[in-house]
Amino acid sequence: MEIEVTPKAFTIGGVNVGESVVIAWCVTAALIVLALVVKIRSRNFTEVPKGLQNLLEFGIEAIQKYAKTEVGGVWEEIAPYCATVACYIFGCCMVEIIGVRAPTTDLSMTLAMGLGTFFWINYMGIRHKGLGGRLMHYVKPIPLIPLVTDIAIPISMACRLYGNLLAGMIVMELIYGAMKYFAVAVPAALSLYFNFFDSAIQAYIFVTLTLCYVSEAIE
């Protein structure tokens, strides 16, 4: 049995764009369609929430409350990004249910997400402390050490997310390979954990780290 650590090549018009990129595009498109459906349905929302409205309000209030706890008064600026990245990570992981490799098991994909957080850290730092204040961050207490630390942030976040999700994928492949024709109940139960609970945990950790780094940048 062979387990490929890197995603398969996928070409469009002779250009290799990578399997994970194509799947990520599909996940993005699905999330956009879902957002549009919710937007249309929101016209019928009432003051007393029920059904879908109740679920949406619970999720939005939860992310807003958590962001407010971590970053204080600037929560309104960072909460939408956190909600978006959490939905994206969860969506990318859930595609494994239909037998497709999750884009988040591609290091280049998780690195792009880490760079997104890196952008927000510096954007929020400059926005609330000014360019001079943000630059002073790199010379105190020891010159350049904070710069090295900041550069390590997107790399560490990318590797952590990639490593955890790749490990889950490998474990599932090994179980399916070992059980072969008897791979029914046990793999299904484990798949529920790795594709649902582990995905939610990884999204939560990524959001938590984002909020912690933003909090440090604006303090």
Image (cartoon, rainbow, N blue to C red):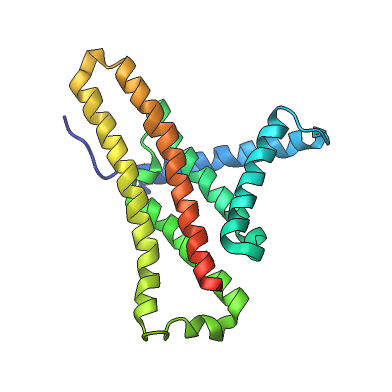
Residue 122 versus residue 94 in the image, above or below: below
Q: Is residue 12 among the parts visible in the rendering?
A: no
Across and down, in percent, residue 118 comes to 46, 65
Across and down, in percent, residue 119 comes to 50, 66
* Horizontal side, residue 106 vs residue 208: left or right: left
* Horizontal side, residue 68 vs residue 196: left or right: right
Q: Is residue 58 among the parts visible in the rendering?
A: yes
* Front residue of this view, candidates 86 and 40: 86
Give the quadrant of residue 51.
top right
* Front residue of this view, candidates 83 and 74: 74
* Horizontal side, residue 146 vs residue 176: left or right: right
Residue 182 versus residue 146 in the image, above or below: above
Across and down, in percent, residue 53 comes to 72, 33
Write the residue at 35% across / 62% down: 155
Residue 68 versus residue 119 in the image, above or below: above
Write the residue at 21% across / 18% down: 179
Image mark count: 0
Residue 7 versus residue 55 in the image, above or below: below
Q: Residue furthest left?
A: 1
Q: Residue furthest right?
A: 47
Write the residue at 52% across / 46% down: 86
Across and down, in percent, residue 134 comes to 52, 80
Write the residue at 47% across / 39% down: 200
Q: Residue furthest front?
A: 69
Quadrant including the C terminus: bottom right
* Horizontal side, residue 58 vs residue 131: left or right: right
Quadrant including the N terminus: top left
* Front residue of this view, candidates 102 and 185: 185
